[in-house]
Amino acid sequence: MTVIAIDGPAAAGKGTLARALSRHYGLAYLDTGALYRAVALAVLDADADPDDGETLGDIALRLDLAYLDDPRLRAEATGAAASKISRHAAVRAALLDIQRDFAARPPAGKSGAVLDGRDIGTVICPGADVKLYVTASAKARAQRRAKDEADKGRTANLAAMIAEVEARDAQDMARTHAPLKPAEDAHLLDTTDLSIEAAFERAVAVIDGVLGRN
Ligand code: DC
């Protein structure tokens, strides 16, 4: 079983990279941020108190996976709400087994998995074969997000996006339970000045090196 852990801050391109790596190596892919986003939507719909960790933990335990297909899943407001509810230990505990089971027994008979999130290398899969910590400056991340919005025909305020990205970084890094940080044995990949293709090539070089494939 090969497990590749990819962590890093919001909008660093982890998802795009993780998906491409899972295809390249023929591994299953799990976007763990989507699980927290789904819980955030369930909390919103239940009109639950975002400070009541116990109730939020129960909602996470009973999570309706249909939320993963909810059209609101990718909205920035949902990401911000996910960041808020993910600070509760009960929410994190409720999602632990789903993530570990996926890594241990990937679907479709795959020989391993790529998981991306905030605490994959530190908490979920501390024994992962390869750990990458993908970062980029807040400005570069906000610019990419602004470009995505522009590509969809929507206008974007860059200054507001930089502020959003920085607020999410601060919240994810400062929490008590499983804060965002590189695992000690993670390989750092700063994509500030890299295209998606260049970031992918660097990641493959690191992974092949660790797995002894070159
Ligand atoms: O990667 P994302 O933007 O979809 O994640 C949304 C939020 O979910 C993120 O700001 C914090 C939380 N999250 C987490 O706490 N742990 C993870 N492994 C993944 C996401």
Image: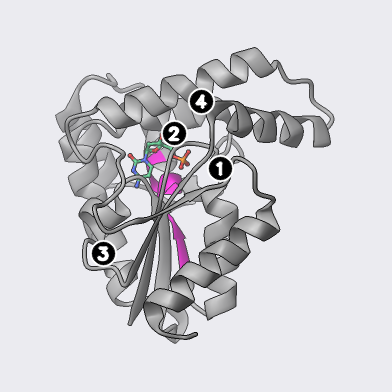
Residue 100 disc label: 3
- Decide which of 89, 207 is in the foreground and name it: 207
Q: Which residue is mark 4?
A: 165
Residue 46 visible in image:
no
Secondary element type, mark 1: loop
Q: Please state the horizontal and vertical placement of residue 32, each as a whole percent of the image.
A: 40, 51
Spatial separation of the CA atoms under disc 2 and disc 3: 22 Å
Spatial separation of the CA atoms under disc 1 and disc 4: 23 Å
Query: Is 130 on the left or on the right of 166, as rendered?
Result: left
Magenta segment range? 29-36
Q: Are marks 1 and 3 in contact (CB under 8 Å)?
A: no
- Decide which of 2, 40 is in the foreground and name it: 2
**Residue in view at x 57 percent, y 46 percent:** 191
**Residue in view at x 35 percent, y 72 percent:** 3
Q: Are marks 1 and 4 in contact (CB under 8 Å)?
A: no
Q: Please state the horizontal and vertical placement of residue 107, each as a whole percent of the image.
A: 42, 76
Q: Which residue is mark 1?
A: 70
Spatial separation of the CA atoms under disc 4 and disc 2: 20 Å
- Quadrant of the rendered image containing residue 84: top left
- Quadrant of the rendered image containing residue 45: top left
Secondary element type, mark 3: helix
Q: Which residue is mark 2?
A: 41
Q: Amino acid at mark 2?
A: Leu
Q: Are marks 2 and 3 in contact (CB under 8 Å)?
A: no
As for residue 140 lying within the magenta part, the answer is no
